[in-house]
Image (tube, helix red, strand yellow):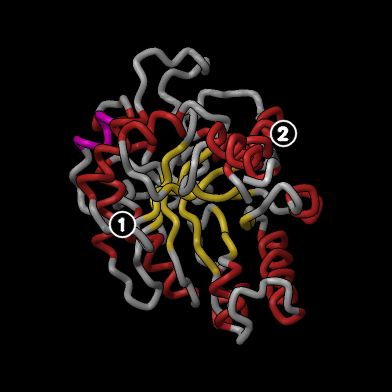
Amino acid sequence: MTVARLSVLLLCVAHLGAQPSGRINGVIDKLQQGEPVFGIFSEDRSPTNAAALNDSALDFIIIDMEHRPLDFESLRQFLQGMLSRNDHTSSNPLRPPALPLVRLPQNGSEQLQFLIKQALDVGAYGLVLPHIESREQALSAVRAARYFQKSGASDFDPPGLRGVSPAVAARYWGLSIDEYMEKADLWPLDPSGEVLLIMLIESREGAENIDAILEAPGIGGIFIGTWDLATSLGFPRDSEAPQVTEAIAKILAASKRAGIPCGITTTINTVDQHLNQGFRILTVGSDVGVSPAAAVVLEHLQDRGR
């Protein structure tokens, strides 16, 4: 899909947004209201790109540190680039127009819990974790993303493991340290939590174990990595093979039964189908490539037989 067609898609779906509330995390707000959310995978970590994406019609940005460099200082710079002192688009000044999520390189079986802490401590509002294949792996991620809860709290379990160093994240969110630690818990495990944890299901094992994975409390969303899933099933990059579409349908159905939003990458040709199927977290491409204006000129030149 060209960047120009991506822009058209974003304009088409921008009107689907729910009315704002007092919640800081706008993606959680929309998901609670049954609305779909639309985002993009970002590979360009420049402050200029951060500002442009934040000013777009996107609901969220997945900052890719799985297939792109694992660099927390450039992540910090990107997050700072998203800030605007002249943002009058929302009645809630603490709500990011486009929510920054971070995709970590953590493979479920590796359980590199310190990476989760690092990303959250910089100020990320949520994480996308790849190759989750079991309930135990999902639960390990949940625990790494939570602080220890107050004694006697109804949502004490599963106990958190996140070390306490909230000053940078609290300042980025625009909160006091106490306010941040109160809000920086996982939704929907904590109904008032503002951190979104999305598990990537992208292997045969993940699809087979999806019901058990969804039993782990603290999961805010499931996302299907179709290319990896297809490759795992023996059909590299063929997401339309019957075995792959069957696995996708199984994951989606399990997510619906569990009441957990399910996501997938979509295009201008498939967005209506995916919405009708019940997908609620949709990515519409990446920020790699030429600008929409340049794409229009190039398409014009191609039509002229350049």
The amino acid sitting under disc 1 is Ile
Please tell me in which quadrant of the rendered image residue 54 appears: top left
Q: Which mark is residue 31?
A: none
Q: Residue at x 53, y 48 (%)?
A: 188
| Residue 168 rendering spot, x and y as whole percentages | 21, 36
| Residue 189 rendering spot, x and y as whole percentages | 50, 51
- Was residue 213 drawn as part of the magenta stretch in this picture? no
Q: Secondary structure at mark 1?
A: helix
Packing grade of label 2 (10 A; few <14, some 14-19, many >=20) is few
| Residue 225 rendering spot, x and y as whole percentages | 56, 66
Residue 247 position (above or below residue 284): below
Residue 216 position (above or below residue 206): above
Tag 1 residue: 116
Q: Residue at x 28, y 31 (%)?
A: 80
Of residue 265 and residue 237, the one placed in the foreground of this image is 237
Q: CA distance from mark 1 to mark 2?
A: 34 Å
Q: Is residue 278 left or right of residue 294?
A: right
- Magenta range is 167-172
Question: Is there any visible trace of residue 158 in the rendered image?
Answer: yes
The amino acid sitting under disc 2 is Cys
Q: Which mark is residue 12?
A: 2
Of residue 14 and residue 139, the one placed in the foreground of this image is 14
Mark in front: 1 vs 2:
2
Q: Secondary structure at mark 2?
A: helix
Lower sequence index among marks 1 and 2: 2
Q: Residue at x 46, y 37 (%)?
A: 99
Majority SS type along the magenta span: helix
Packing grade of label 1 (10 A; few <14, some 14-19, many >=20) is many
